[in-house]
Amino acid sequence: MLRLPRFQLHTPATVGDAALLLREHRAAEQDSAKTGTPGITVMLVAGGTDLYPNMKRRQFTPSTLISLGKALPRGIHNGKGLTIGAGATLTAVASDTRVITGYRALAEGALSISTPQLRNMGTLGGNLCLDTRCNWYDQSLFWRMAEGMCMKTDPSVVCRVAPSSPRCLAVASADTVPALLALGASVRVVNASGERVVPLAEMYREDGISHLVIGRDDIVTEVILPPADGWRSAYLKLRDRGSFDFPIVGLAAAVRMDGVVVREARLAMTAVGSRPMLVGAAAAALVGTRLEDDAIAAAAAAAHKIARPMDNTSGTIAQRKRTVPVFATRALASLRGA
């Protein structure tokens, strides 16, 4: 049985308290790095459905965890669009009537994650900040010591997937992210110095190790969705088993219709690169059309062109690459009469 390492747990009552605690411990972490003992000593935890297993495998061994369970907002509120607290569970998001009717891709993405028990614990904010995954990385410490460490756990060694690569190729695999990208979401981010709103499309970088653009001093507190007027959306997921598994391809599509004509469109993918990505050329192929077969085919071809699956997760590269245009075609065709 894999056991958690020892750690100290803080449970601040507010986001402000959590941000101050995080700044204090991050300063101590940076001081330790200057004296020759680098490493992550403090981390945030919400539902813990991904972090705790990673800690058991010794992918992370922080001495301090700051729990956001009491601090993060959990509500889902109407406004100009919809605001969802980052502490909302995936079950709450997937079952909310406003999400199901106005932002269907998000409901489908949240519902596709893992099992009911884990969706009851896992949070939307935690899913947005989910660590990247790789067959070399997501193993026990014993396995990794026997086979050899990879770049993600030891930057002094090569990437085991592509030894000539200058960067880690671990893949993004959060199901709610492509859905939220397709829906035009932003996130509210808080730290000890204040808060700001960041478009979700600007939150990720193509780097398997440091995949989040926001800092480790930052806390995602809310997801902000624009009005759903005229929008239709869908999410499709490929995985080995019909439940529980992470995506090996995840694709979301959204179109805003004016009558029968597409006025805006977004198509987003995950699990085919180190960051989730919007396919700009796919959107351009759809705007001004009536979602005819040739427009959908052009959008699917654009998605296929930029998908870059690697041999670091389940399924073959060819299978995952071929799935992208198939899913794009199916998702967009389903929006014709949505």
Image: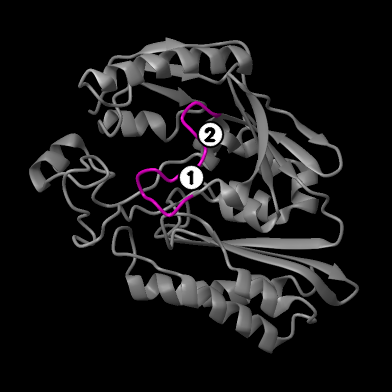
Give the SS element for disc 1.
Answer: loop
- Taking the view exactly as shown, the residue that stands out farthest to the left is 146
Which segment did they paint magenta?
205-218
Q: Nearer the viewer, mark 2 or mark 1?
A: 2
Mark 2, residue position: 122
Task: Determine which of the numbered discs, if any, sits on residue 114 in the image.
Answer: 1
Taking depth in this image into account, of 246 and 259 the one nearest to the observer is 259
Q: Give the position of the C terminus as an image quadrant.
A: bottom right
Which sits in the foreground, 119 or 199? 199
All told, the count of numbered labels is 2
Q: Residue furthest front?
A: 34
Q: Is residue 105 magenta?
A: no
Q: Is 213 drawn above or below residue 286 in the view shown?
A: above
Q: Quadrant of the N terminus?
A: top left
| Colour pattern | one colour
Question: Which of the two residues, 2 or 188, is positioned nearer the viewer here?
Answer: 188
Q: Main secondary structure of the magenta part?
A: loop
x and y percent of residue 222 in the render?
67, 33
- Any part of residue 320 in sight: yes
Q: Position of residue 197 (x, y in %)?
A: 68, 37
Q: Give the camera-side residue of 168 and 267.
A: 168
Residue 214 position (above or below residue 292): above
Q: Tell whether position 215 is magenta.
A: yes
Q: Residue placed farthest to the right in the image?
A: 259
| Mark 2 in CB contact with mark 1 (< 8 angstroms) | yes
